[in-house]
Image (tube, helix red, strand yellow):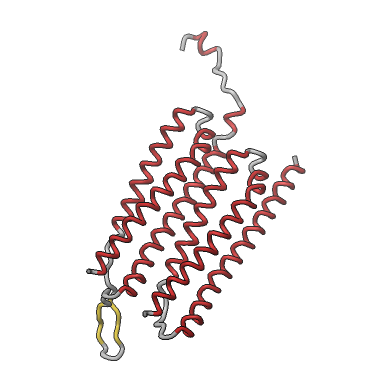
Amino acid sequence: MNYNILTYALYFIVLLFVVLYVGHTLYKNGRPFLVNTFSGNETLADAVNKFLLAGYYLTNIGYTIVALKIWEHVPSPIVMLNVLSLKVGAIVITLGIMHFLNIISLVLIGKNRKKHITNQ
Amino acid sequence: MDYIVLAYSIYLPIAVALTIWVARTLHTNGKVFLVDIFHGQNELAISVNKLLQVGFYLISLGFAIIKLEINPRWEYDQVTGQNFQEQINNSQSMIEELSYKLGSFILILGLMLFINLFLLLILRSGSKPRTQTSYTPPQNLVAKGV
């Protein structure tokens, strides 16, 4: 049994699950923000939301697959666990940071809009 | 079994399927924007949408096919002090090579999708004011017989 291939399979399955779960959560909970941003135009907000979901899936899954390649030789299960935890952890942390940046930018956009409306 | 041929035969169907999925997403969701951009002229929006879809298919399938070739990299061996070509002769090196190819293709597809989204948003906001003001031709031109 080649441990490298087993590691790749585990890595890909875990990260696919995480990316799909996070994407679904963002899709469901980002919709009110988008409806708010497009001032109640729901069809447009849904279209933008679908666009964003597809783009999110493509960029994140693409990045996880690209990052698969840079790996050393894995001789034993213990090394496999070590390497796997490091890789998966790094990508999950990146996802978390992106998530918070998203929330911050949504809040900033909301504030900007409020200022704009009160100025008028 | 040649591993490079196997890698090609895995890469191409996945790339084609992904292209079709992304093009469908663009087609169904781009229609809302295009109707807005063309001020509610539905027929024009539908035909422009179709043209854009065909263009997207051509560009991304062409790109996928151009990037198909797998060239084993040259690496430097420090022990012998010579360059040697890395061989793709087991499933592990095939998976590594294939993942790099597919991943970069998927990243570029995602980038194209975002570029499309921003273009549509910019075009839509640029075409907005004309929906509110109705254009009335100057009357005196008709009277002058121009």
Q: Residue furthest front?
A: A1
Q: Residue at x 30, y 65 (%)?
A: B7
Q: Residue furthest bottom?
A: B79
Viewer-side residue, B44 vs B106: B106
Res A70 quadrant in image: bottom left
**How many numbered discs sit on the rendered protein?**
0
Viewer-side residue, B38 vs B60: B60
Spot occupied by residue B23 in the image (x, y as percentages of width and height): 42, 46
Spot occupied by residue A91 in the image (x, y as percentages of width and height): 53, 70
Q: Residue at x 36, y 64 (%)?
A: B101
Q: Residue furthest right?
A: A118
Relative to B109, say whether B123 is above or below: above
Q: Horizontal placement of B44 versus B62: left or right?
A: right
Q: Residue at x 26, y 75 (%)?
A: B89
Q: Horizontal placement of B65 versus B106: left or right?
A: left
Relative to A81, say whether A29 is above or below: above
Spot occupied by residue A82 in the image (x, y as percentages of width and height): 51, 82
Quadrant including the C terminus of chain A: top right
Q: Residue at x 50, y 57 (%)?
A: A57
Quadrant including the N terminus of chain A: bottom left
Q: Residue furthest left?
A: B1
